[in-house]
Image (spheres, rainbow, N blue to C red):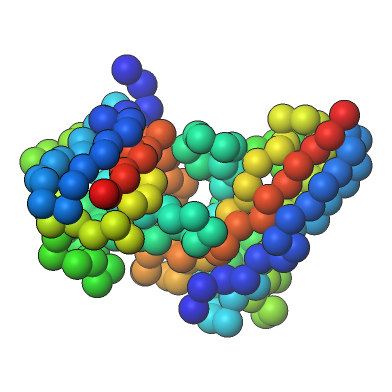
């Protein structure tokens, strides 16, 4: 039931790109993405809804493949501020969010 | 104050103590949530409230007792906890129906709880 995120950790240099994946074993209504910096609260990045609607950051892009029950978060031209742990949260139509184990991203100068 | 606030930020308690965590949201939302975040584990939903009514109890042990006196305040009362309950407890709020996966959740900074 818990979504699986991959990779578990990513190390980048500034300017490099990264993709974080989130897979579910159940049909999804929505996928949420959040970023949590060490010692801070998770911060909302994006929601992707079944049918193609999206809400969120202008500088963050993501995709949602409903048939494969997968979502990917694309981080391009990474900055130091992108460092943190990224969580996907999968939502069934009328149910709660179930969060993945997280992907730890570190960006170095 | 803006956003979602939580007090205290850190709490150390013995297994026989009784303590309470407080959460307040200043966003005009009607849904509030308690999550538990343990090391190397995903965020675990504990309770959901919508317009002061509890709509979700995710099989949480009775030593955790939530209270929601109004849409802006949420408490988590703790008693006879176990060391494995040590974790970061996060409060969140959102607009719209509780449990809805349509609206983003806004998180507080959390309370770091240590049970001795």
Q: Residue B107's image quarter?
A: top left
Q: Residue B69's image quarter?
A: top left
Image position, residue A99 (x, y; %): 50, 62
Viewer-closest of B10 and A34: B10
Residue furthest to the top in view is B1
User: Is residue B71 in view?
Assistant: no
Q: Is residue B101 left or right of residue A62?
A: left
Q: Residue at x 27, y 49 (%)?
A: B115
Image position, residue B61 (x, y; %): 19, 67
Viewer-closest of A30 and B113: B113
Q: Is residue A20 left or right of residue B36?
A: right
The vertical placement of A6 against B85, above or below, is below
Q: Residue at x 51, y 42 (%)?
A: A42
Image position, residue A96 (x, y; %): 38, 64
Q: Is residue A4 left or right of residue A7?
A: left
Q: Residue at x 49, y 78 (%)?
A: A1
User: Is residue B87 in view?
Assistant: yes
């Amino acid at each position: 039931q818990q979504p699986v995120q991959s990779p578990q950790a990513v190390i980048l240099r500034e300017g490099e790109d990264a993709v974080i994946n989130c897979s579910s074993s159940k049909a999804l209504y929505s996928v949420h993405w959040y970023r949590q910096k060490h010692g801070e609260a998770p911060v909302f990045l994006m929601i992707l809804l079944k049918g193609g609607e999206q809400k969120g950051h202008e500088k963050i892009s993501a995709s949602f493949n409903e048939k494969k029950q997968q979502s990917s978060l694309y981080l391009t031209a990474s900055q130091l501020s992108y460092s943190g742990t990224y969580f996907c949260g999968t939502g069934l139509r009328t149910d709660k969010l179930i969060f993945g184990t997280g992907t730890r991203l570190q960006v170095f100068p | 104050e803006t956003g979602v606030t939580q007090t205290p930020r850190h709490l150390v308690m013995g297994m026989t103590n009784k303590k309470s965590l407080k959460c307040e949201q200043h966003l005009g939302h009607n849904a509030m949530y308690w999550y538990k975040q343990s090391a190397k584990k995903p965020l675990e939903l504990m309770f959901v409230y919508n317009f002061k009514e509890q709509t979700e109890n995710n099989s949480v042990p009775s030593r955790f007792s939530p209270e929601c006196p109004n849409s802006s305040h949420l408490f988590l009362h703790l008693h006879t906890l176990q060391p494995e309950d040590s974790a970061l407890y996060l409060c969140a709020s959102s607009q719209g129906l509780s449990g809805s996966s349509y609206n983003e959740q806004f998180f507080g900074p959390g309370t770091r709880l240590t049970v001795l």
